Amino acid sequence: MLELDYRSKAMDTKFKINDEITVDSRSSAGHCRTPAYIRGKKGVIERICGQYPNPEEIALCKKDPQIVTLYRCRFKQMDVWDNYSGKASDTIELEIYEHWLIDA
Amino acid sequence: MDNNYLKMGPHDVGGEESLPIDTTDSDMTHWEKYANALRIVVSSKRIITLDELRYFTEALGDKYFQIGYFERNCLSLHNICIQKGIYDQELFQKIKSKKISEFDVPIVDLPDVGSINHIHDGKPHSHNVSDFQEDESGDGPPDYYFDTLAIAQIFINQGLITNDDITLKIEQFDNVFPNRGKAVVAKAWHNNLFKEALLKDAKKAISDIGMELETFADIICMPQTNTVHHIVVCTLCSCYPRTLLGMPPSWYKSRSYRSRVVHEPREVLAEFGTIVPESKEIKVHDSNADMRYLILPPRPSNTEDLSEIELSKLVARDYLVGVRLPK
């Protein structure tokens, strides 16, 4: 059983709040929590959620999954959808693990 | 959507075009409650993790949307157990047959003679058998219920879980969890210090009032304001703060809600009767990983004299997901 301080924010993280990021647009095999619609999109770090075991490895029953930093990222809806019909200020926020984020 | 080629499977629906949303919440049947409780017990005891369950559900392919939500859960749980060697098909079929036989009892013992004589109003009187009707009729429980009962029985036989674990979970989902979020919101409306603590660190604030959510996930609370409207979805499955709000409503798990709310939130909100003015920003939260969300609705006007208990009766579940606002 994993007994971790998931919420520990003390560890070194690759990105800081308000950093500009791009979600990697690679494809994935197996279980993954990065929806297709957000891959390749540019946004900013909204907050650092903490350190969590990598769900892609938990899904495969790995005993000691890698611990990765989870971020909440904010995207402008206009940057996510080609024909977004709402307001320019509308936003969408998702949680993205560090290994899916690249510098903007 | 230009990212279609990256779609991971039938579950990855965010951004798809879909049907209007059926905004009514259909009640759960007993077998669905049982299946839900089993899944929660098994994952909270880490016998099988949530991500394993998700992975196997995602691997159902075309079957994913051909069968219902709880059927999917049941089938993926079974497939994992077979793959992990927790049991084999032979044992499963044996226990399942036994479970089916336990249900094979007549609902009413109808007389098997042509007519029945009895006395009422002081006179002998006869009835034909056709005068009687079964109290209950129908197809009986679905086959997935027997699957679920068999899986549970094997776990129980192996000492991994107890029947009480499942019964307790059903009870909590019926009577405890759905009231917690309402109580938390009423407290935030009533007590400004608690509201501040809730917005700063919801999991800690909720724990500090003695409510243990027994969840690995963190809770983030977002307040509805005059300038921002928040709404929550899980496009990949059905992530929801269950120990705080109870079961997600049926529409929250539906393909149409999960597909559409991310790319046309105003239209979706309008289907719930919530018209968001153009002047407001809409912020969609895709609850796609380890955070869970609680939306704090504005306190209704003219409620200054109400107690916390009275306020809690004004809180509707739909406010806490962001699909409706208090009038």
Image (cartoon, rainbow, N blue to C red):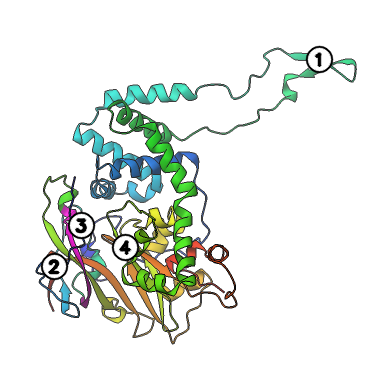
**Near-viewer residue (B50 or B212):** B212
Mark 3 → mark 1, Cα distance in angstroms: 69 Å
Residue of label 2 = A10
Label 2 SS: loop
Nearest to N terminus: mark 2 or mark 3? 2
Indicate whether B136 appears above or below B98.
below
Give percent across and percent down for residue B61. 28, 48
Residue of label 3 = A32
Nearest to N terminus: mark 1 or mark 4? 1
Label 4 SS: helix
In which quadrant of the rendered image does the C terminus of chain B lie? bottom right
Residue of label 4 = B204
Report the amino acid beneath label 2: Ala
Mark 3 → mark 4, Cα distance in angstroms: 28 Å
The part of the image, by quadrant, that contains residue B221 is: bottom left
Question: Numbered disc 1: what chain?
Answer: B
What stretch of residues is rendered in magenta?
A: A42-56
Report the amino acid beneath label 1: His
- Determine the main secondary structure of the stretch shown in magenta: strand
